[in-house]
Amino acid sequence: MEKLIEAVKKSFEKKFSRQPLLLASPGRINLIGEHTDYNEGFVLPGATDRAVIFAVAPREDRRCRFYALDFDQDYNTDLDHLGHSEWRWPDYLQGVLDQFLRAGYALKGLDLAFGGNVPIGGGMSSSAAVEGGLAFAVNHLFSLNLDLLSLALLAQRAENEFVGLRCGIMDMYANLHGRPGKVMKIDCRHLRHEYFPFDRPELRLIISDTGVRRELASSEYNVRRRQCEQGVRILSRYYPEVKSLRDVSLDMLEELRREFDPVVWKRCAYVVRENERVDLACRDLLRHDFVSFGQRMNESHCGLRDEYEVSSPELNWLVEAALSVPGVLGSRMMGAGFGGCTISLAEAGAVEEFKSRVSAVYRRRTGREPAIHAVRIETGTRILGS
Ligand code: GLA
C-alpha cells in the first residue's frame, strides 16, 4: 500500500506541480446477504485493505483535471460541461460532482490523480470505491459537513443516474462506514447498521477472482430488480402492507405461488431466504460459531446459483474447488455475479493449500490463472494526510 500511495502522490505532483490531499477508499467484501440491498433487506459487508488512493486538490476556477494511473489516461473537463466520456472511469468521478451540483453545493474545480489495487470490475466494488472516495474528498475539501450516510446516498445516486446501474446502497455504505476487524449488518430499509467483530486470528477471508468481466452483469442486474418489483406487486394485491420483499415471508409466497410466474417466484423466494440467512449468520457470529456461519455462506451460494441464477460456471468451479480444501468453512460468489469473484472463509493454516489447489482446478477448467488473495477488514474511506 505504501508504494501505491507514493506512486499516486508522485504522479499528482508531476502532473499538477502542487501538493495534494491523500485519501484511501477501500473495496468492500460482503460475507452474506447478496441482492438483498435493493429489496430493503439485510447485508453483511466490510471495507478491506484493498483500496483506491486519491491525490486531490481544489482549484480556484471550475476546471477539473483527472489522471487515472491504472490506465495512464488524462481526462479534462469543467463543472459546467460534465458529460459521458468514451471511457468508464471519468463517469464515476463526474457522476459524483454532478450530484453535488444538483444538490446545490457551490463547488470549485479539482486536480485529481488516483490509482488502486481493488480489482477493476472484479466484484469488490471498485466503482463504489471511486465514487465514495471522491464524495468524501469533496465534502472535506469544500467543508460541506455532510455525514457519511448522506455521502453514501449521493454516491449511489451518481451510479444510478449518471453511470446508469440501478445498484443498491451496500457498496457505498460499506466503503464509507468500514471499521477495522468489523463487519456491519446494514438494514437497507432504515439505513442503519450494527457492527459485528470479525477478526479471529485463526481465520482468513480469501478472495478468488475469476478474471471474467461480463457486461451481462449490469443488464441482468436490472432484470433481477424488475422481477423482484413484479413479485412485490403481486404480493401487495393480497397483503397491502407489503412494500418490498423485506415484508414477505415464505408462507406468504407459498400461499400465492399460483399467482406467480415460476421464475419470479424463485427470485422472490431466494431474497426472502437470504434475508433470513443474514439474520442467522449474525447470531452465529455472536456465538463464535464459524462452522455454522460457513454453511450459511454455502447455502447463500446455492441460492444465488439455483434460484437467483446470477452465478456462472467459473464462479461455481471456484466455490467447488474451495470447498474441497480441508479447513475451508464456507465459500460463495460475491457481488452482482456473472463474473467477478468468490469469497471463502478458511482456517489460517489452509491458505497455502487453498491457493495451490484452487488455482490448479481453475487452470485445468479454463486455462487461466485465478487471482487469489487473503483480505483484511479495514477502516472505510479516510484521509491519509497531505
Ligand atoms: C452490486 C451492487 C450492490 C448489490 C450487489 C449484490 O455490488 O452494487 O448494490 O446489489 O451487487 O448484492
Image (cartoon, rainbow, N blue to C red):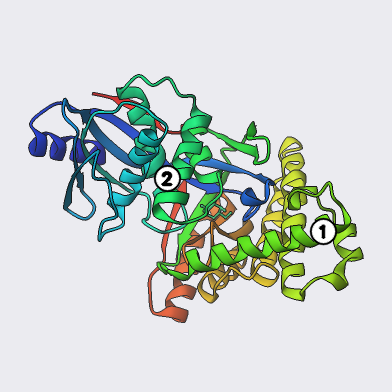
Measured Cα–Cα span from mark 2 to mark 1: 31 Å
Which secondary structure, mark 2? Answer: helix
- The amino acid sitting under disc 1 is Leu
Q: Work out whether 177 lies above or below 230.
A: above
On-image quarter of the C terminus: top left
Left/right of residue 103 with respect to residue 299 in the rendered view:
left
Residue 349 or residue 151, whichever sits in front: 151
Sequence-earlier tag: 2 or 1:
2
* Residue designated by label 1: 235
Residue at 87% x, 73% y: name it. Answer: 258
- The location of residue 248, given as percent across then percent down, is 81, 52
- Left or right of residue 233: residue 355: left
Q: Give me the disc on residue 158.
A: 2
Image coords of residue 239 (percent x, y): 87, 53
| Image quarter of residue 59 | top left
Question: The residue tagged with tag 1: helix, strand or loop?
Answer: helix
Specify whether residue 339 is in view.
yes
Q: Residue at x 31, y 22 (%)?
A: 142
